[in-house]
Image (tube, rainbow, N blue to C red):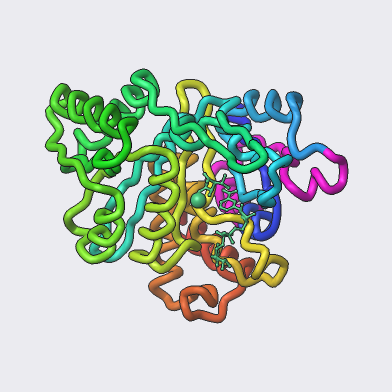
Amino acid sequence: MVKVAVVEGDGIGHEVVPVARDIIAAVRPDFEFFDVEVGYGRWERTGSACDEETLADLQSADAVLFGAVTTPPDPGYRSVLLQIRHALDLYANVRPIRGEGVDIVIVRENTEGLYSGIEWTEPDRACTVRVVSRWGSERIARYACNLAKSRRHLTVGNKANVLKSDCLFIDICTVEAARANVPCRTSYIDALCLDLLMHPDRYDVIVTTNMFGDILSDAAAYLVGGLGMLPSANVGERHALFEPVHGSAPDIAGRNIANPVAAIQSGAMLLSHLGDPASAAAVGEAVGRVLSAGIRTPDLGGTAGTREFGAAVLREVGRGKA
Ligand code: NAD
Ligand code: IPM
Ligand code: MN
């Protein structure tokens, strides 16, 4: 029996995750789902956002479907998502950007860089150490090259003109690309941000360090209609977690207007990861048909609610099966 842990999290996570879960359950009625509570809401209620037992629950699943968590900018609060990514060693954050004339995959290193967790606060300054290790860079470079081998080429997003840590990163990525016979070029991340938006056709697989990948992927959402559209996979050797790129969106939470496409497509990535690309494709095609029929949430200029959009996708998935 395939076990899927379901984490709604906070804010619109409570709205988009049930929609995605129902769609996965419709195509795979044999999956067993179990809920896991983490996040700011839990922290407010119990004083703990996530603990060892919760992490063990997530580790026991074949895959995790995750919504979003609120992270207050409080120095005493450690982001739950970062705890989970570290505990499950989810080193590759894969963020596909697909839409009309756009087919790009950002592969973001997910465990080190500026998110090393090595930081401290002094009275008059605060420091965060950016760690780029050979081992960490080799594994993400290999992941990206493996993906690029069946696609077109690789771009290494970096700031090696300023950061010694990125000199190491690009060296390792270029060596891995040559080894895998993948055409590869390097691009400074600031210029890349703009060029990606102006000429998306120039890009295929982009590999980059943790924080650059975080920023680049939100910007890239512009190409396909915004944050409501971008799914992602967080993958390691033993575990995998699937979540929208967006956050808990407190500004729109609780109003049934959040776009569930990112969460649904994250569900499709989960299906693919669990060895069912046919169901993943069926879900992706159903989403495409609903959008083409003009059923859209307000962020895409439509009037459909989160639940109504989900119901339309469920109907299409059913039709596809018939
Ligand atoms: P956000 O992604 O939550 O929202 C940014 C903007 O995009 C908002 O205006 C929001 O309404 C809109 N938006 C996001 N998702 C949408 C959707 N599905 N449909 C329609 N509109 C959508 O980013 P933020 O506002 O910077 O952060 C809010 C909280 O979420 C913070 O606490 C942040 O730390 C957290 N966060 C969590 C994750 C995660 O859990 N993966 C990711 C990013 C941010
Ligand atoms: C993301 C988010 C997270 C990140 C935050 C909430 C820790 O922005 O998944 O893109 O920075 O990785
Ligand atoms: Mn982000």
Residue 26 coordinates in the image, percent (x, y): 58, 50
Q: Which residues are magenta?
A: 18-47
Compare residues 304 and 165 and report the one nearer the observer.
Answer: 165
Compare residues 269 and 25 and report the one nearer the observer.
Answer: 269
Residue 212 coordinates in the image, percent (x, y): 39, 46
Q: Is residue 287 above or below residue 239?
A: below
Identify the residue at horizontal 46%, vertical 46% (top origin). 232
Identify the residue at horizontal 26%, vertical 54% (top origin). 192
Q: Is residue 222 above or below residue 210?
A: below
Quarter holding residue 18: bottom right
Compare residues 119 and 85 and report the one nearer the observer.
Answer: 119
Q: Report if residue 163 is visible in the image.
A: yes
List the single residue furthest toward the right: 46
Quarter holding residue 50: top right
Compare residues 130 and 127 and report the one nearer the observer.
Answer: 127
Q: Is residue 180 left or right of residue 230?
A: left
Q: Report if residue 235 is visible in the image.
A: no
